[in-house]
Amino acid sequence: MAKILISGGSGMIGRAVSELLLKGGHEVRWLSRGEGNSHGIRKFRWDPENNTIDARAFDGVNHLIHLAGAGIADHRWTAAYKKKIIQSRIKSAELLFNTLVRNGVKIDSLVGASAVGFYGAGSGGHVYTESDPPGTDFLATVCVEWENSYQSFSEAGIRVAVIRTGIVLSQHGGAYKKLKPLFSKGLGAVVGNGNQAFPWIHIHDLAALYCEALFSENYRGAYNATAAEQV
């Protein structure tokens, strides 16, 4: 049995990954704004904005999953919120790494979130692989800085896998939950110009990928988490 600490565990992806890990007999812990227990998962308090964390969360931990960060689609992109999107990812990763070092905690792996926004908007029909360079728009900049925040873990000898996630489809949240009511009532329409790529992945497949990357020595570096076909 492994002990896994997850930041952002209460989100849609975190819950799906946690459920799969628990079914596998592992112990799951969340870093959260509050303490307590949630369906067999112990929550430890942290506040990346104020650089505070309960170091007890790391006791005996073997693996770390980093999902925390301000929601991309939660608010209008003002200058202040764009800064928050970036800083919430970088500062939280720095806090995790510094806590590991300060407390002498040795973990086997880190699986860190990123997104296919790394490649920029507007593919023009191009199918991206992990070897393609980053784009130049805001989301690409976010993803580049996001992934750079994991370098300190790699330099410390920790195996790091980065998951560049597409649009996650789940009945419990995300794009599908927002679009389904409109389309079910006959109010759906073409999104955008109707020709742009829609890189998607089902929540169950994404959760399985996180668990595979967590434990398999073969996973190092960045991976695109999307369905194989272009839609």
Image (tube, helix red, strand yellow):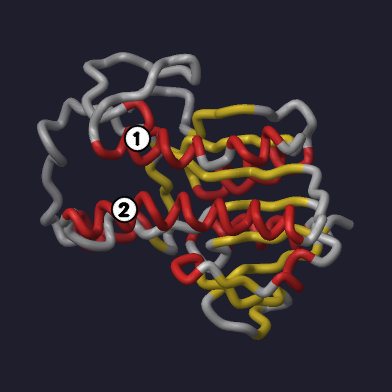
- Quadrant showing the N terminus: bottom right
Residue 79 lies in what quarter of the image? bottom left
- Which secondary structure lies at badge 2? loop
Residue lying at 37% horizontally and 59% vertically, measured from the top left: 70
Q: Which mark is residue 133?
A: none
Above/below status of 30 relative to 109: below
Q: Nearer the viewer, residue 183 or 67?
A: 67
- Which secondary structure lies at badge 1? helix
Which residue is outermost to the right? 1
Q: Nearer the viewer, residue 37 or 191?
A: 37
Residue lying at 56% horizontally and 82% vertically, measured from the top left: 34
Residue lying at 40% horizontally and 37% vertically, measured from the top left: 143
Q: Position of residue 90 (x, y in %)?
A: 46, 50
* Contact between labelled residues 2 and 1, with CB atoms less than 8 Å apart: yes
For the residues marked 1 and 2, what is the alpha-carbon distance in whole angstroms?
Answer: 11 Å
Tell me if 164 is positioned left or right of 185 in this view. right
Mark 1 sits on what residue?
A: 117
Mark 2 sits on what residue?
A: 72
